[in-house]
Each structure stands twice: as C-alpha cells, then as structure tokens.
Image: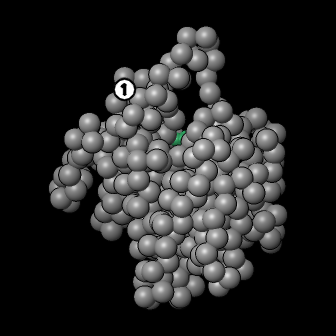
Amino acid sequence: MIVVHGGAGRIGPERHARMRSGCLAAARVGHAILVAGGTALDAAIAAVRVLEDDPEYNAGTGAVLTREQTVETDAAVMDGRTQRVGAVAAVPNMGRAIDVARAVLDDGEHVLLAGTAALTFATERGIAQAPLDSLITERARQRFAEESARRQRGVAATSTVREGGTVGAVAMDRAGNFAAATSTGGIVYKRTGRVGDSPIPGAGTWADVRIAVSVTGDGEAVLRVALAHQIAMRVSLSGASLAGAVAASLADLKAITAGDAGVIAIDRHGPVIVHTTPTMPTAWIDDTGEHDEIDRFATQR
Ligand code: ASP
C-alpha cells in the first residue's frame, strides 16, 4: 500500500487533473516496487523522486524561490522498522534532495545535514548539484513575483492561499514495515537558511512500527506542535484510531497556531488523508485499486 501527496494548498481548477495524474504516476512507481517485494522505504523514496522531477510540484525541479531568488530544498526519509532517519535542510540547488536524505540514512552517522554541509556530503556520495537554471521554472518565478507583490502590501500568504506543491509518500511493504518520505522547496519568499517542517522527524515526516506520516502545509505551525509525532503518540499511547489521531492533531494545530496542513498517513488498516486547505493532490494504491483525489478530503475551506 502506498499513498502520495502533492502538497496542501489552493490549486486552481485548471490544474487539478494534471496534479492528480502526477501523484498517481508517482504512486504507481512506488507500488511496482512493493509488488516486486521491495521495501516500504524504497517505494516511498521512488515515488517522491518522480514528483521531484515533475516541474508541477514544489520539490526538486519546480521548487519555489527564496527571497534571494535561489532554490533551497528540505527532505527527509524515515524507516519505521528501525526508526532510522536521514534528512537534509536548506540544501542549495539539489534536484533530488530525497536521494541525499537517503544517503544520510544509509550512512548512519548523522540524522540531519544542512546547507553546504549537505552539499559536500552529497558530492562525496556522487550525487551532483543541479544547474540552477534547470530547477527554476516559469511557474516558480511567477509565484515569487506574486508573493513579493503581496509582501509589498504587507501581507504574507498562508497555505490556504499558496499553491503548495510539497511532495510526500508513505508506504507499507509486504513484511508490514512502514516508511515515510517528504521533499519540498519550502515556502515561497522564505529567507535563505529557513528550514521548515518537512525534514524534521516528528514534524513533517514520521514512521514507526505502527504508522507512517507525511505532512504538508504551514511549516512553522507544524513545527510548533510536532504534528506527525503527535499523531503517532495519540495512536501508540492513547490507542486512538489513526483517523481519530489525525483529526485531533489537526484540530490542535488550528487551536494553538491557527495554521493549516494536510496529512497522509497509513497504518495496517489503510490510508488516512485529511487537509484543512482547499486542495491537496493525493493518490493511493491499495487492495481496492488505484485512486486519486484533490479536494475530497478537505475538512474546511
Ligand atoms: N510544509 C512546507 C514547509 O513549510 C511547505 C508546504 O508543505 O507547502 O516548508
């Protein structure tokens, strides 16, 4: 079973079909790995890689721009069976940050590498930086222009206004192991060096022996409540259902921070998908077949 998301936000109706089909294509790649007996970790990473390469999403190619009009990405992968994590934060010009995160996990010395240290590590592992121009899309430039105009009026967009486009995947393999992977360009017009929730274990990404979670949305808000870990603790300590844990944690997020987010999560019983933003493109493949949605799981608009 695999679930993929393409970011909580507000995507115009003209792009809905494209965003859904991109997620489904990614889910199929991950699912093929599971069917062939591969691990949840490999499947989740493979799915995320497809969306990093897809210019429609805010990760890898198509990542949003910082205030200095550069690209810095965050990514994390977590293996539920071992609770080992690999993550990178604010890495400049990386097309596939998820591969660097995976290399950090495999290496095992550290959990999170940031900025140029992550780049040095990537180079050591033979993962090349992308030429900047190859990552920046017309849409990313447009999003930057819109946000800078907004900032000049003294306002900043939140995830109910932004298009979003962060990508993530959660998977369970035949052995019953879980994994989660998340990758993002972060939020448009962020300061360089800003790190969001996505690469932080327990905030934007989490997997253990019971569940896997990938979060998207208002990163600062998600960090403040450690959203993914909150969901996991509700399940493991209070015996809540996964759906109940996600709903209660999103309600807490709203009450404490006024922030919005989207969550994809799985346990042995299947997927849970919820977002408090208008849209979150999602696809999943389980025993019941292939599915994709973009606004069906919105809990408020
Ligand atoms: N949560 C991401 C961040 O704050 C952004 C997003 O999911 O849209 O970096």
Q: Can residue 24 be seen in this view?
A: yes
Residue 101 seen: no
Q: Taking 73 as reference, is 228 above or below it? A: below
User: Label 1 amino acid?
Assistant: Gln
| Left or right side of 204 for 260 | right
Front-lying residue, 173 or 78: 173
Query: Is the CB of the residue bearing disc 1 within 8 angstroms of ligand 1?
Result: no
Rendered position, 276 above or below 53: above
Question: Can you say which quadrant of the picture contains the N terminus?
Answer: bottom right
Residue 134: x percent and y percent? 27, 42
Image point (57%, 46%), residue name: 15
In the image, 228: left or right of 146? right
Q: Where does the image place residue 123, in percent across and percent down from the top left? A: 19, 52
The residue furthest top is 153
Q: In this view, does 287 lie to the left or right of 242?
A: left
Q: Outermost residue, front direction?
A: 14
Image-quadrant location for residue 266 = bottom right
Residue drawn at x 50%, y 78% as measured from the top left: 31
Q: Residue at x 44, y 88 (%)?
A: 37
Question: Looking at the picture, does residue 122 appear above or below residue 253?
Answer: below
- Pick the quarter of the image with the C terminus: top right
Ligand 1's quadrant is: top right
Q: Mark 1 points at which residue?
A: 69
Q: Choose top left, top right, bottom left or bottom right for residue 283.
A: bottom right
Q: What element carries label 1?
A: loop
Q: Where is residue 9 in the image (x, y as percent from the top left)?
A: 63, 42
